[in-house]
Image (tube, rainbow, N blue to C red):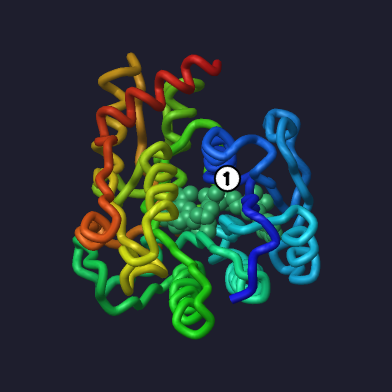
Amino acid sequence: MAEPPGDRILVTGALGQIGTDLVEALRARHGTDAVIATDVREVPEHLLLEDGPFRLLSVLDGDGMDAVVREERVGTIYHLAAILSATGEKEPELCQRVNVGGIVCVLETARKRGLRVFAPSSIAVFGPDCPSIAPQVTPLSPTTVYGRTKVTGEVMAVNYWKQYGVDARGIRYPGLISWKTPAGGGTTDYAVEIFHAALEKGHYECFVSADTRLPMMYIDDAIRATTSLMDAPVESIGPARGGYNVSGASFTAQELADSITERVDGFTCDFVPDERQAYADSWPADIDDSVAREDWGWKAEYDLGRMVEEMLDRLGAQS
Ligand code: NAD
Ligand code: AKB
């Protein structure tokens, strides 16, 4: 492996739901200047990423990525740029181009420049044949284009490790619930939208059925999972390195609505499933994360009640 140009961190897709939180967390740990946020679009005014380095960068621009890595003396890439499931089904070619093309660019840059890589996977790698509590090792037969791109990403990460020694690691994130940035075109977006609707309108029309149960996770747990995995010594990382199962909290859309009703007077929720119901139905209800617990000591801290409290407090304080 080549010597990396430096030890700074580059984050792709930094303006998205996870990126806004992850950049802040990485800057708090490593220093503001050590983390270069990048995205294909300019920083919107309401985001305060301007207090640290930001570069416009498409993950499909291999030469551009290589130049930023050298100029900014990067040693690790957190690769978050992607097209999520609901947008991906509407625009399958874009989804494949960005998700598969992006991981190819990142892994190739890492191979040439000796970088470490974090590249998230998703519960969308599972398909209808998966047991309702998804094991770490099971056939991966996703029905969505997005899910198939995530399986490709996992396989490539493992192959680059085995063939070239690129230390690429990933997590199969559940649906993530956060308050700083809106969710970005996925199936699990209802679990974020419902909080905004509850506080702004007292009502939400949920696009999956009341009994839809999916694995979810609060953003603080997701960020801690990410940094814990990247902090773990390489000897502790096993064959699941391309996509570790991590569990947060599993609940139905009705249970989520009920938990908000307990805390927001008069909140009501209707359930009017649309095409996203089919994607949700193809995913497991819960996750077995025993391998992540064993390999790098993973344990979630937020259950449904704690997460709902925190979301309402944070969003309430913002408005
Ligand atoms: P998001 O949609 O909120 O953000 C993605 C970002 O990528 C956006 O800011 C977008 O501008 C950027 N982007 C799109 N095309 C690009 C390109 N060509 N070059 C550079 N940037 C580009 O997504 P997110 O929710 O933050 O997800 C980040 C990662 O985590 C993705 O890989 C996603 O598959 C994975 N993931 C997310 C969730 C979740 O619930 N948020 C769950 C499982 C996995
Ligand atoms: C989506 O719904 O597409 C994402 C995911 C679970 O990967 N939130």
Residue at 33%, 31% in the rendered image: 307
On the image, the x and y values in percent for residue 105 come to 66, 72
Image quarter (top left, top right, bottom left or bottom right) of the C terminus: top right
Residue at 39%, 42% in the rendered image: 224
> What element does badge 1 sit on?
helix
The answer to whether residue 153 is above or below residue 247 is below
Residue at 46%, 21% in the rendered image: 314
Which quadrant of the structure image shows residue 132?
A: bottom left
Q: Which residue is mark 1?
A: 19
Q: Residues within 10 Å of mark 1 (few under 14, many from 20)?
A: many
Residue closest to the eye, 317 or 115: 115
Residue closest to the eye, 143 or 311: 311
Image quarter (top left, top right, bottom left or bottom right) of the N terminus: bottom right
Query: Quick check: which quadrant has ligand 1?
Result: bottom right
Q: Is mark 1 within 8 Å of ligand 1?
A: yes
On the image, the x and y values in percent for residue 87 come to 57, 59
On the image, the x and y values in percent for residue 108 come to 64, 75
82 sits left or right of 308 in the view: right
Residue at 25%, 29% in the rendered image: 305
Q: Can residue 13 be seen in this snapshot? A: no
Q: Can residue 296 be seen in this snapshot? A: yes
The answer to whether residue 150 is above or below residue 71 is below
Q: Amino acid at mark 1?
A: Gly
Q: Residue furthest front?
A: 3
The answer to whether residue 233 is above or below residue 202 is below
The answer to whether residue 74 is above or below residue 147 is above
On the image, the x and y values in percent for residue 34 come to 65, 43
Which quadrant of the structure image shows residue 206?
A: top left
187 sits left or right of 260 in the view: right
